[in-house]
Amino acid sequence: MVISTSLTNRINNVINVELDLMKKKLTELDFEDDYINDLAKEIISTSKQGKLFRPMLTILIGKMSEQMDENISLNIVNLAVAIELLHTASLVHDDIVDNATQRRGKESFNYVYGNHMAVMMGDMIFAKAGMFVFDTFNIEVMNKFGSTIVDLSMGQLLEMKSRNNIKQSKENYLYRIRKKTASLFETATWSGSVLANMNTNANEKLGQFGMNLGHAFQIFDDIRDFTDLNNKINNSGKNIGIDINNGILTLPVILSLENNSQSNPFYNAIKSNEEINVNDLGVYLIHEGFIQQASSIGNMYIQKAINNLKHFKSNEIKNILSDIANSIK
């Protein structure tokens, strides 16, 4: 996903005050111990190098409120901090599971400090995220946040369960990414609208917007594993090719196996978890049309997300959200 400079400037013009406050809160996390604080800063530095995409959505949607006041604004910023911390903690744990060595252009925390340290720091960041949600004093949002942690964990477990399973379907994949990725997008958008005191229908539409956006985000991120092979690190900051060589089958590969699996020249290697040349696999998936098929599914989710916004009157924020959706592909 590439957000253009012009779109970035439009976003900053709308939410720069809230975004700056959120970044300040992220960099000032306090665990009451200098050593732990230094470790936390190393982990949070990955957020500074990322796009802050999910909390940015929370703040944008909060700004759609016609009832905005200082209290609502602070609650939305606290939620945005929580969303980013939850995302960051989940990445720490994902890197452990994936034996990753890189995250956003630098050595991953688990690679530097070991898995035991990474598990504990991930847990601490999860807990700190919850504390920021509690500061909103909104029971609905607290419940949603808790259920999202369950969803993220389920998604990771389902991904682990599905490794090297050549019989998994497109539906299996979509359910898995709904849990592991799209659920946090949904929480970011739904909770922002709830804290902004929008009505139930608006909450539902904006939650669906986030869910559809999250599906598209993950699908195109997985596609780039096979189309962006000149880079060592992909859009999310992880090692290119790490998924397939960890036995994680993403949408283009699943589509190539779904109807006539044994015609795929990589069938036996995928089944037996042998080392796979990602460049060769990417060429095959492009040539046979499976990347295009996956892109069509991703585009369907983008269109669904844009359609979710039709409920709202036209304004700059609605236009920005539509343009963000189109930037995913």
Image (cartoon, rainbow, N blue to C red):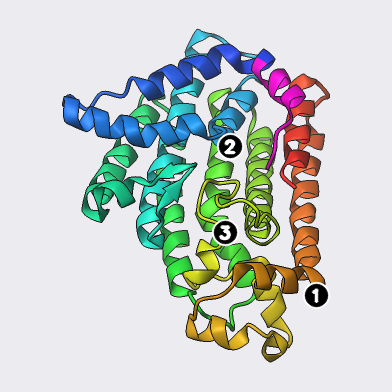
Image coordinates of residue 226 in percent, x first then y, are 67, 62
Circles 2, 3 touching at the beta carbon (< 8 Å) = no
Q: Quadrant of the N terminus?
A: top right
Marked residue nearer the N-terminal end (1 or 2): 2
Q: Which mark is residue 190?
A: 2
5 is within the stretch colored magenta: yes
Q: Nearer the viewer, mark 1 or mark 2?
A: 1
**Residue that extends furthest to the top in the rendered view of this protein:** 70
Magenta span dominant secondary structure: helix
Name the secondary structure under disc 3.
helix
Marked residue nearer the N-terminal end (3 or 1): 3
Residue drawn at (48%, 74%) of the image: 163
Q: Amino acid at mark 2?
A: Trp
Is residue 1 visible in the rendered image? The answer is: yes
Q: Quadrant of residue 204?
A: top right
Q: Is residue 70 above or below residue 62?
A: above
Is residue 170 visible in the rendered image? The answer is: no
Q: Amino acid at mark 1?
A: Glu
Q: Which residue is mark 3?
A: 177
Q: Nearer the viewer, mark 3 or mark 1?
A: 1
Q: Is residue 216 above or below residue 263?
A: above
Image coordinates of residue 145 in percent, x first then y, are 43, 41
- 36 or 191: nearer the eye? 36
Q: Amino acid at mark 3?
A: Ile
Name the secondary structure under disc 2.
helix
Marked residue nearer the N-terminal end (2 or 3): 3
In screen coordinates, is 90 left or right of 305?
Answer: left
Image coordinates of residue 244 in percent, x first then y, are 54, 69
The stretch in magenta equals 1-12
- 257 or 269: nearer the eye? 269
Q: Which residue is mark 1?
A: 288
